[in-house]
Amino acid sequence: MNKAARGRRMGRPSNRSWFVLTAVCAAALGSLSLNVSFASDLDDFGEPPATDPSYYREQPLDPLAAIAEHATMPHTFEGALEINNYQYITREQVRDGNALPPDELTSRNYPTNGYPSSLFGAQPWTQKLLMFEEFGTERLDPAAAAGTMPLPLPTLGAAPQQDPANVWRSSPQSEQLDVFLKQTGLHPFPSRAANTDFSNPWKSEVELFLERFLTQSPAEGRPPGEGWAHQRWNEFYPQQFFKTLQAGARVNGGTRDEKQLHGYQVGEFGPGGLYYNTADNSNPAFNGTTRGIPIKIHPNMPVQDHKSVWTFDGTLPPKLLMVRYGQPVLMRHYNALPIDPGANRGFGLHTITTHEHNGHNPAESDGFANAFFFPGQFYDYRWPIQLAGYDSINTSATDARAAFPCSPGETLWVNDAAPGLKTCDNGSIKVRGDWRETMSTHWFHDHMLDFTAQNVYKGNAAMMNYYSALDRGNEAIDDGVNLRLPSGAGLPWGNRDYDVNLVIADKAWDRSGQLWFNPFNSDGFIGDRMTVNWQWAPKLDVRARKYRFRILNGSVSRYFTLALVAECAGEKTCPMSGPKKSGKSYKRVPFHMVANDGNILEHAVPFDGSMDLDNDGDRQEHNGVLPLQAIAERYDIVVDFSKLAVGTKVYFVNIMEHDTGIGVKQNIPLAEVLSEEYKAVIERKNGQDYRWRDGDPAVGMVMQMVVQPYSGTDLSMNPADYEPAKSGKPAGKKMVPLWLDRSNPGYLETLSNARRREFVFGRSSGTDDTPWTIQTDDGIARLADARRIDAAPQLATGPTSAGFSGEGTVEVWKVKTGGGWSHPVHVHFEEGIILKRGDKAPPEWEKWARKDIYRIGGEDESTSSVEFAIKFREFAGTYVEHCHNTQHEDSSMLLRWDIEKPGQFLVMPTPLPSWEGVEYAPSVGVPSFRTGSGWGASN
């Protein structure tokens, strides 16, 4: 089909833009952050005009017929697969070049249909854990000079960082990428609507690859027009920014050394601290710098090729963004991946879209699966970093618990009763919104339609810490608001001395040591080696004091059950024996969970055997053992190492066994894992590692910690003071109370007028390549289609002035499954409060939590259904809901849902990106997309 025909088929309107106020105008009207009292009045919250490319369309009179017609059209991500002159490869052809093509796959489980990942002589606990490297933000100043060097073009070069023979399969020079990233400012300057005035700097190379001229090729990949302009741009004008790029594996050039908040001068990151040396304590070249760190899973293993691994900046350590409530941030994300979609070692796609999981962000910055952008382009994601309830609760910004943690002399623009610049007062500035919506541990990752699993697995994932008056990252400030979670005290906010981010994920690599993934199995992918922060079996030194660990399950399909144990000398010294003749035994290490899915809990939940946490009559099953942790779930825990002797070795141990990627099998008794009564072993054949036998190789020790002396004073909170009521002890203090009080018998009455929706995650009518489906309220199980809207809650209000009070839009959603399949369901944009897990109350770790991942399935700690209450406020647009077993998501277990503006009647169109920009196709809502299935919570 030629381009003109495609345009007619998709109903393309004229390509005209309509602007309310550009960023440059905004700066002229006010200060650098638009510090004027009428900021929100300058923003337009209405629908795009009919002349706008993103204008809203009529809902079809016969939606079922329109849905059926969409099924006959080209796939919405077809533009990503062009290879030359409107010729397209298929989704399946992206897999060409895989180290194991379909006819060479095995029938074995670990890794999924592959061969064991050999260790190249590596031994456990012989490499230092890489601590996350901060992106570091800068002030966004339209008056400041900005570097104008464009994103460097790919060039030929030596492997593994470049391709020596084909420029379209290569990457830019590593040194040039560092020069580019070090430039000051942003050019072109960010704009409210997508920048279509500048061209993709890689246009000339793209044209040679496509063998045709591009009539247009915008520099920014964000869809054009008002429908995808930054909502409330002036009110939430980005005051800070950072730029990064997605690139193939390369050696870290130390580009971000100067952007670390600690500056390698403070606390444990300063000289003499545990983490001053970033990679190898025996090599002083890594003192105070990440320069020279290659991408290796272990020092004994090969350097990863630029087609194997695609990380932020193209480097390790993994990256961390640190933000503060009340201060909007802009991320300019460049795509520096190969032009050829087949330059991927058989998995991953070069087009990307970034989801901030799970921020309260407008849809244009949420990472919609079909709003992807191409190599050479950038996408400006503006994250407001505001508390949910901004328009309805604490709108005058008078509550000290809703505040921006600050340094002396800092200022922040606040839209309160007297809008304007506010100055730091005793370490904080009050902001609008509901403090009960305070979040802490997030991550952001790729969300490319049908390729999320592959792109995230290749490295498109970073973590994100939210700081607030409650969780400010300074344990010394005791102001009655700050919870004083373990962190440190050298900086006014954001200390990470005793606050450690961990991304744990199973991986696999081929016989050459290069990262390997099986994209052919839609049931899921199980790796055979566990990694932490991209490293196999790392070691972390810890002080004899309390630590906070922010633990993210970054896998594709694998669930974890993590235990924490300490090693004892002597096989009978402690309750659980080690391997025979090892001279070791082990004991459980208790801890408290303080946050779940990035939301600080109402009560700190003790995992010490003092409570029956899931009401099954067994207190010991969670003594030192976390609950099941699904893909994308985050658990924040506090561990007190002061109760252990200096030199003690402590381990995270995974005891959850998998057979396949469909779901979990069972927890292996911890004692059997520690004694190695349960231990997978490799069988060799013809001089090579041939297969695993006797169990799941990912069951076992994952990471080692060694307790070091501590001469300081631990000023962090005692989590026991915040525990829920338990035998012989009344409930302690609350950390962050839920907005829905379960102790009130009338709480269901609050939900009686809430619209109800149900989603059934199943496998009934899918194809071999796309077997997974979701059934919505109209009773039809469907495959994913970005043009179809399955639900559309509507905002109760638009932007409000200070003093307004309300609740927003509240709904009750229920997710269900059957057949024994496991699905961690993720709803973008908002967190919910679980009302019921099956026909039971939720366990303690969910009872006090707001969640964005809802585990459904046949596992012991899951149920076939979960019902939850959820609110929608502040922002509108297009979002998604999906299974976060991302192989299921990519095999059609994803749906689109929209948040509509008050009184909206028309529907938002669907963006269709290509190398020449973004067109729009009409969307259609299912018959029940606005009505749902009824009202109120189930009985």
Image (cartoon, rainbow, N blue to C red):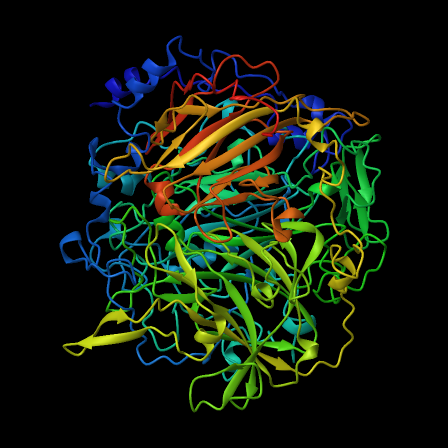
- Return the x and y of residue 875 as percentages of the image width and height: 60, 29
With respect to residue 749, does 493 lie above or below?
A: below
- Return the x and y of residue 93 as percentages of the image width and height: 20, 44
**In terms of depth relative to the viewer, which is nearer, 336 or 928?**
928
Q: Quadrant of residue 486?
A: bottom right
- Return the x and y of residue 676 as percentages of the image width and height: 41, 78
Question: In which quadrant of the rendered image does the N terminus lie?
Answer: top left
Q: Quadrant of residue 26?
A: top right
How many marks overall?
A: 0
**In terms of depth relative to the viewer, which is nearer, 843 or 503?**
843
Question: In which quadrant of the rendered image does the C terminus lie?
Answer: top right
Residue at 39% x, 81% y is: 123
With respect to residue 441, does 690 lie above or below?
A: below
- Tell me, yes or no, if residue 299 can be seen here: yes
**In terms of depth relative to the viewer, which is nearer, 62 or 242?**
62
Residue at 28% x, 17% y is: 9
Q: Quadrant of residue 909?
A: top left
- Tell me, yes or no, if residue 201 can be seen here: no
- Return the x and y of residue 499 as percentages of the image width and height: 64, 64
Describe residue 30's horizontal placement relative to residue 308 as left or right: right
Describe residue 748's horizontal placement relative to residue 379 as left or right: right
